Amino acid sequence: MSGKPVLHYFNIQGRMESIRWLLAAAGVEFEEKLIMCQEDLDKLKNDGLLMFHQVPMVEMDGMKMVQSRAILNYIATKYNLYGKDMKERLLIDMYTEGMADLFELSFKVILGPPEQRDATKSLIKDRAKNRFFPAFEKVLKSHGQGYLVGNKLSKADILLTELMYCVEEFDASLLTNFPLLQALKTRISNLPNVKKFLQPGSQRKPPMTEEKLEEARKVFKF
Amino acid sequence: MSGKPVLHYFNIQGRMESIRWLLAAAGVEFEENLLMGQEDLEKLRNDGLLMFQQVPMVEMDGMKMVQSRAILNYIATKYNLYGKDMKERLLIDMYTEGMADLFELSFKVILGPPEQRDATKSLIKDRAKNRFFPAFEKVLKSHGQGYLVGNKLSKADILLTELMYCVEEFDASLLTNFPLLQALKTRVSNLPNVKKFLQPGSQRKPFTTPEMFEEMKKSFKF
């Protein structure tokens, strides 16, 4: 037992990637137990390790944590990435929940019906460009500080950076009109822990492709 | 200005109902600005009151709060319904996020394609009975206390009670094998603030049927 957190999930970004980003940015080394086949998942279920029979699951501080938001909030609190008081926590949560809407759409591209993929991709680009990125650019402009909340790195900055890398996969030009967001992305990417995480060979997972999805369908029952 | 929180949302349960339950259980009086047509929603947007152009929005403590989870977390913190430390907050979040999965399915019955309604209802009943209710019954059994976390009323107890009323609309027998959940539902329902909220004439909204939603949609451009 190394004492490091252990992340249980499939070998994809999915709902674990934000947790990987947050731990990495906090400088926390972690291990991964990658679920490669249905039997791996069934074993976790049968051993009673998954409260709702689902992953992500993170073993940390003697607990088997499930539900990605619960896990992210715990990590953010533990490593001082959740603001200094309840008003800052509210802002961080508001911004993070807005980002979650876009992340959910990116899951829908993969998990939804193939015939709807193009429509969902269009929606992602439209929402990023016209709803979410303008809102976050406006926040940065309003206070002129280098981080979204309280002039200090938080869960919100880290997850927004992850989101910007994610939506660029759909359209590399989406950040064109958002200079402050671009600056934030650069600033976060240059933090030593994040820089290391962005290097090849780290535990960061690549974006999903249709080929990988088809492979996964063969191995898992879905 | 009364100083009371003001809730901006449609005249349905939807994503505001959990917030109504939490405020009511905390004994906080609130006002509602019910959106009855597209013009009402446009006004909020044009006045720049909705960070992501969406409702729910709650005006409280000088802020225009959006994103239901952010709002719920703020209210829970303010009124001491979020546990005593980060480990209790984790448990409350884990349980609440499990409940959110079931609530999302109940939204899907209304918002999804009519031809999928029966399948979604079956899934709700199956998940409640075989995944979520057993998990929460097990928690209550494990410590034998009257509340889910820390022997004290929290956001988790209030939202689970709301959820139990919700899923009973789909199948009144779903709680049959869960005596501790039934006891929790009764206990929380009998708290004076909750009892008042459960009376006719309160701000609690009726169970939304797909037909009600179709009627409402006519006044909006969804």
Image (cartoon, coloured by chain):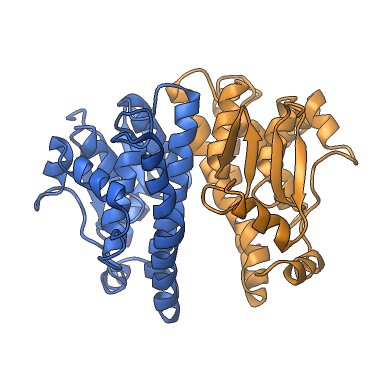
Chain colours: A orange, B blue
Residue A175 seen anywhere in this rendered image of the structure: no
Q: Residue at x 29, y 46 (%)?
A: B180
Q: Quadrant of the N terminus of chain B?
A: top left
* Quarter of the picture holding the C terminus of chain B: bottom left
Q: Name the spot of residue A44 as percent of width and height, x first.
A: 65, 51
Q: In the displayed structure, does residue A27 sit left or right of residue B149?
A: right
Measured as percent of width and height from the top left, residue A137 is found at: 60, 37
Q: Residue at x 39, y 54 (%)?
A: B133
Q: Is residue A31 visible?
A: yes
User: Front-most of B49 and A23?
Assistant: A23
Count of residue discs: 0
Q: Residue at x 62, y 65 (%)?
A: A120
Horizontal and vertical percent for residue A75? 61, 29
The quadrant holding residue A175 is top right
The answer to whether residue A157 is above or below residue A112 is above
- Left or right of residue A209: residue B222: left
Q: Residue at x 36, y 43 (%)?
A: B57
Farthest residue toward the bottom?
B115
Which of the two residues, B183 or B2, is positioned nearer the viewer here?
B183
Question: Residue B23 in the image: x percent, y percent?
Answer: 25, 37
